[in-house]
Amino acid sequence: AQKITQTQPGMFVQEKEAVTLDCTYDTSDPSYGLFWYKQPSSGEMIFLIYQGSYDQQNATEGRYSLNFQKARKSANLVISASQLGDSAMYFCAMREYYGNNRLAFGKGNQVVVIP
Amino acid sequence: KAGVTQTPRYLIKTRGQQVTLSCSPISGHRSVSWYQQTPGQGLQFLFEYFSETQRNKGNFPGRFSGRQFSNSRSEMNVSTLELGDSALYLCASSLGSASGGGYEQYFGPGTRLTVT
């Protein structure tokens, strides 16, 4: 069964604008972690941000923030002040700590930042 | 601190051959995971090693195997290669823990394997 859902089509974003990438997940595990990764055309996966299921506050890392809505099983990534270097594929991932304890990825969102 | 390194970066093999990929984790990281990425299937978990023991395994046939050495370096082996094994193979390391929770994974640049 699909654990992580990312359904947005490719997105074009104006430089310096904010962009929100949607991610919904499915789990019955009470303890889990949510991750966002960036994959530029070079192929390397770059860790961006982490949110634990028990964390009370939304995670933030520089220009990245995670809008965590636990009841809705939603973990959207917000990138503020987009830069040309933000053009990449973005993957949402989840790890269930009491379940199979492996990192499961969504299909990804393509973001292109235009000047 | 040096990142995760993977060798080789590119590889071309023929059907039926076998291949070994190598991954050196970030210094101090004890957990190494392997993933296969293809356009059709996306990112799929292969296996995870922690302190030389396979701690978790994905749904791949037995042709895919791995191991981890005492210095945390890991190798992945694919025997009897098939055309469908063509993919980007990514290795990730993390601090890990006995319970396996929490720590973010840092990925290497990947090995792009082409099977002809």
Image (cartoon, grey):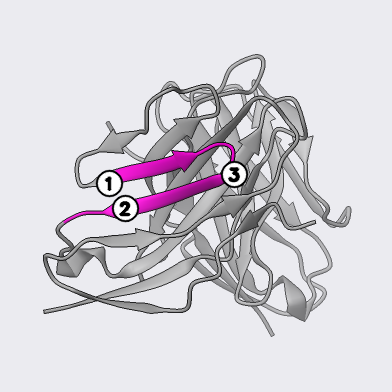
Q: Which residue is mark 3?
A: A73
Q: Is residue B108 visible?
A: no
The crowding category of the residue bearing disc 1, from other C-alpha atoms within 10 Å (few below 14, some 14 to 19, many at least 20), is some
Q: Are marks 3 and 2 in contact (CB under 8 Å)?
A: no
Q: Are marks 2 and 1 on the same chain?
A: yes
Residue B26 position, x and y percent, is: 41, 32
Q: Residue at x 46, y 63 (%)?
A: B9
Q: Which mark is residue A64?
A: 1
Residue B76 lies left or right of residue A54; in this view the side is right
Q: Quadrant of residue A41?
A: bottom left
Is residue A28 inside the magenta stretch? Answer: no
Mark 3 chain: A
Q: Earlier in the sequence, mark 2 or mark 1?
A: 1
Q: Residue at x 72, y 53 (%)?
A: B77
Residue A23 position, x and y percent, is: 52, 55
Residue lying at the far right in this picture: please name it.
B62
Query: Which contiguous range is marked in magenta?
Result: A65-80
Q: Front-most of A47 and B89?
A: A47
Is residue A66 inside the magenta stretch? Answer: yes
Q: Which residue is mark 2?
A: A78
Q: Residue at x 60, y 23 (%)?
A: B101
Q: Quadrant of the C terminus of chain B?
A: bottom right
Q: Residue at x 69, y 47 (%)?
A: A26
Q: How many marks?
A: 3
Q: Earlier in the sequence, mark 3 or mark 2?
A: 3
Secondary structure beneath dot 3 equals loop
Q: Are marks 3 and 2 on the same chain?
A: yes
What's the residue type where badge 3 is placed?
Answer: Lys
Tell me: residue B35, above or below residue B51: below
Residue A100 lies left or right of residue A64; in this view the side is right
Q: Are marks 2 and 1 in contact (CB under 8 Å)?
A: yes
